[in-house]
Image (cartoon, rainbow, N blue to C red):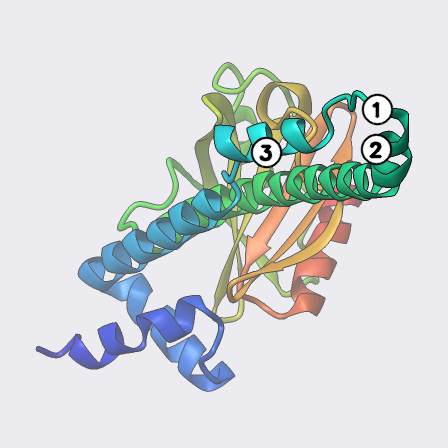
Amino acid sequence: MACDNWLDKLDAYIDGELSAHEARALNEHIKQCASCGAEALRRVQQKRMVQAAAFKFKPDAAFRARVRKQIGSPTRTHWMARWIPVLVAVAAAFLIAAFLIASQRSRGNEQQLLGELIDQHVASLASATPVDVISTDRHTVKPWFAGRVPFTFNLPDLQNTPFTLIGGRVAYLKQSPGAELIFRVRLHQISVFIFQERAALDGNGKEGVHTNLSFQVNTWHRDGLRYFVVGDAGASDIEQLSKLMQAAE
């Protein structure tokens, strides 16, 4: 089949292992081929599920029983004096392990959050109708969201910039509605997601620039809203569009 060569490269594309030239070529193919786009989305979602599962480790009952047995109260003073250093070491190791597991879960929640947004971005790339309101005019796109999302936002004036507004659609994160705005810069498509911070994020997600697979994600919050700029464009393009969004009035 004509798509076999592209499908063979999908895993390397998702893992960010293709050259810039190959990644751009495959990205363009995904935009045009619904079959390959759907397969790319399936593999990204599968990878997200595997990553999420890696952070679900919990000590089993047998492990907890062994720890309780080791730190149980001794009956003789001389036995206690001999084993206090051991018990302290065990307790310290247990606390460190608990801290590391909690940290891993926090990082896992953050990665899962970014992964969900990247999945939606990839779905937009693969979709024949990526937007519900099609317009390059910010004064048309912004009012369209009135009544569809429980907040308002501003869009920047893109005149004399390399960016073009394509349109937007309603997106969902943790069952909370938000806005996905689609921009184009040269051959790349960038999604800007906007959600209510409390309703959608529960405090997850650190501000700043993140790299996930072959995608760049820049995030910040303002006025109770959390913004995510997602795309496979260069870091300078992601940063420039982020600054335009932050300065929008």
Q: Is residue 152 left or right of residue 212?
A: right
Mark 2 or mark 3: name the one nearer the start of the chain: 3
Dot 1 amino acid type: Arg
Viewer-proximal residue among 89 and 18: 89
Front tag of 2 and 3: 2
Q: CA distance from mark 2 to mark 3?
A: 19 Å
Viewer-proximal residue among 179 and 60: 60
Q: Quadrant of the C terminus?
A: top right
Q: Residues within 10 Å of mark 1 (few under 14, many from 20)?
A: few
Q: Is residue 35 above or below residue 218?
A: below
Q: CA distance from mark 3 to mark 1?
A: 20 Å
Mark 3 or mark 1: name the one nearer the start of the chain: 3
Does dot 3 land on a helix, a strand or a loop?
A: helix
Dot 2 amino acid type: Trp
Q: Measured from the top left, where is residue 55 in percent x and y?
A: 53, 43
Viewer-proximal residue among 111 and 130: 111
Q: Measured from the top left, where is residue 51 in percent x and y?
A: 46, 50
Q: Measured from the top left, where is residue 223 in percent x and y?
A: 78, 25
Does dot 1 land on a helix, a strand or a loop?
A: loop
Q: Quadrant of the N terminus?
A: bottom left
Dot 3 amino acid type: Arg
Q: Are marks 3 and 1 in contact (CB under 8 Å)?
A: no
Q: Residues within 10 Å of mark 2 (few under 14, many from 20)?
A: few
Q: Which mark is residue 79?
A: 2
* Identity of the residue drawn at 35% across and 74% down: 26
Q: Is residue 188 above or below residue 190?
A: below
Q: Is residue 220 left or right of residue 11?
A: right
**Residue bearing the label numbered 1:** 76
